[in-house]
């Protein structure tokens, strides 16, 4: 099979590296809006060749969309003339808005997927072969995709060593809003607040493992994450309100010096270690 990857940053570049080693795949082509990313992807061996989207539509059996979620809405509408046996797989972090915008004549070709993988780094240089190994990939609303395209995508995900979970787009966006998107909002908020309150020297001197761990994802791409927050707006607002409620409770317990209650609140929260 020939594969095309649109977007050659961390996600697309890592996918290219992994797919190049798969016996199922004969050729990995790529393209990116940024010509420098295309050049770098070739230099780093992330793909075999650079092709335009028009060329991919004619030559590729599978086309992956590894671009920001707002860009997916635009690109997918340029794929309406693909062949019946061409599979389109999107790797966006939101699902419902994307599915709603897929042209009806290619919905059966379309596999809405979200790999729960990534780092705070971006660009072709950030790519590494093992990014998807043992990662969960969520496939949404697969009933609307044709059986052939579902089987093809599941087979490929399995060969990449991914763990496949099926759920509706609405469920996905609700759950990732809390478990994935909210932590990014908290990290960006913490970074913003600290930068306004603290001298650079103090941040460097006192920013230990806890702070660095909390702040890590605030180094992520603002373009990518602002798009995600935009598409998952309602779930994001609900998640933030939930977090504000818990943080306000913590604030009030401390303010009122209810130290026994504080310990109980922390004990309840600590039960998360039984899951993770």
Image (cartoon, helix red, strand yellow):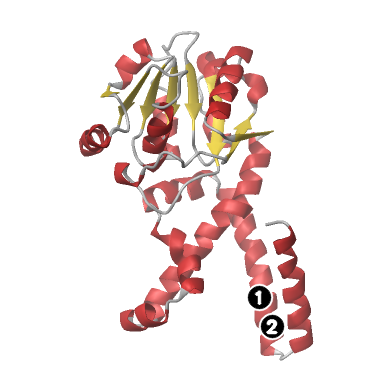
Q: Is residue 65 above or below residue 136?
A: above
- Tell me the quarter of the image containing the N terminus: top left
Name the mark on residue 14.
none
Q: Residue at x 44, y 8 (%)?
A: 83
Quarter-of-image position of residue 125: top left
- Mark 2 touches mark 1? (CB < 8 Å): yes
The answer to whether residue 32 is left or right of residue 245 is left
Q: Which one is nearer the viewer's eye here, 236 or 141?
A: 141
Secondary structure beneath dot 1 equals helix
Q: Residue at x 59, y 56 (%)?
A: 237
Secondary structure beneath dot 2 equals helix
What residue would you read off at disc 2? 252
Q: Whole-percent x and y of residue 196?
A: 38, 77
Seen from this angle, which residue lies furthest bottom?
257
- Tell me the quarter of the image containing the C terminus: bottom right
Q: Which one is nearer the viewer's eye here, 101 or 222?
A: 222
Q: Whole-percent x and y of residue 241?
A: 64, 62
Q: Residue at x 24, y 32 (%)?
A: 42
What residue would you read off at disc 1? 248
Q: Whole-percent x and y of residue 231?
A: 51, 43
The answer to whether residue 161 is left or right of residue 45 is right
Q: CA distance from mark 2 to mark 1?
A: 6 Å
């Amino acid at each position: 099979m020939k594969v095309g990857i649109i977007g050659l940053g961390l996600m697309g570049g890592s996918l290219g590296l992994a797919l190049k080693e798969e016996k199922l795949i004969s050729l990995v082509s790529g393209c990116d809006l940024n010509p420098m990313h295309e050049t770098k992807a070739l230099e780093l061996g992330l793909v075999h060749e650079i092709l335009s989207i028009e060329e991919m539509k004619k030559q590729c059996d599978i086309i992956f969309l590894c671009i920001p979620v707002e860009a997916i809405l635009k690109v997918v509408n340029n794929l309406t003339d693909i062949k019946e046996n061409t599979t389109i797989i999107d790797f966006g972090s939101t699902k419902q808005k994307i599915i709603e915008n897929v042209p009806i004549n290619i919905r059966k070709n379309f596999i809405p997927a979200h790999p729960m993988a990534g780092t705070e780094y971006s660009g072709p240089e950030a790519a590494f072969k093992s990014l998807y190994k043992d990662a969960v990939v969520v496939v949404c609303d697969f009933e609307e995709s044709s059986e052939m395209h579902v089987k093809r995508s599941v087979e490929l995900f399995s060969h990449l060593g991914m763990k496949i979970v099926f759920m509706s787009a609405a469920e996905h966006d609700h759950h990732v809003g809390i478990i994935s998107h909210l932590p990014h909002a908290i990290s960006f908020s913490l970074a913003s607040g600290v930068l306004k309150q603290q001298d650079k020297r103090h941040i460097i001197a006192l920013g230990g493992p806890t702070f660095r761990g909390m702040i890590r994802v605030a180094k992520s791409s603002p373009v990518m994450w602002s798009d995600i927050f935009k598409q998952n707006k309602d779930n994001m607002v609900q998640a933030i309100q939930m977090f504000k409620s818990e943080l306000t409770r913590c604030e009030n317990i401390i303010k009122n010096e209810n130290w026994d209650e504080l310990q109980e609140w922390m004990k309840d929260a600590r039960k998360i270690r039984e899951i993770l």
